[in-house]
Image: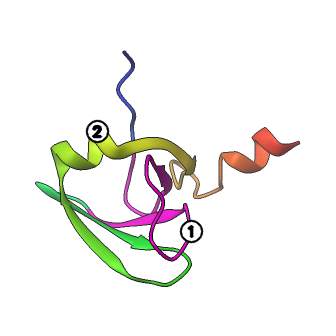
Amino acid sequence: MEKKTFELGDIVQMKKQHPCGANEMEIIRMGMDIRIKCVNCKHSILLPRVKFEKSLKKVLRSTAGDGSALSQADEQ
């Protein structure tokens, strides 16, 4: 199984959506714990890294490299 890579500032999709109905979260802190913020209601959640990696479905937009979003190339 391929290990998913993520960085600070990435927009990710989790396996379960947030209670507000949004399905996009932004990574705002990384370390032993990962803090993610709901893009819709701005509520932040602190998860242990292991639990975050299990709950991560996919990276929607990445800030890797030059800061451009990867998903824009996928849409075209």
| Residue at the far right in the pictured view | 76
Label 2 neighbour load within 10 Å: few <14, some 14-19, many 20+: few
Quadrant (top left, top right, bottom left, bottom right) of the N terminus: top left
* Among numbered discs 1 and 2, the one appearing first in the sequence: 1
Instruction: Inspect the image, locate mark 1, and give the three-letter code of the amino acid beneath it.
Output: Ala
Horizontal and vertical percent position of residue 29 = 27, 67
The residue that appears at 82% across and 44% down in the rendered structure is 75
Horizontal and vertical percent position of residue 22 = 56, 68
| Residue at the far top in the pictured view | 1
Q: Report the span colored magenta.
A: 6-29
Alpha carbon separation for disc pair 1 and 2: 19 Å
Quadrant (top left, top right, bottom left, bottom right) of the C terminus: top right
Height in image: 36 above or below 65?
below
Residue 17 inside the magenta-drawn segment: yes
Instruction: Inspect the image, locate mark 2, and give the three-letter code of the amino acid beneath it.
Output: Lys
Q: Which mark is residue 45?
A: none
The residue that appears at 20% across and 60% down in the rendered structure is 47
Quick check: marks 1 and 2 in contact, CB under 8 Å? no
Residue 27 inside the magenta-drawn segment: yes
Height in image: 59 above or below 36?
above
The residue carrying mark 2 is 54
Q: Quadrant of residue 9?
A: bottom left
SS for callout 1: loop
Q: Quadrant of residue 54?
A: top left
The residue carrying mark 1 is 22
SS for callout 2: helix
The residue that appears at 65% across and 56% down in the rendered structure is 68
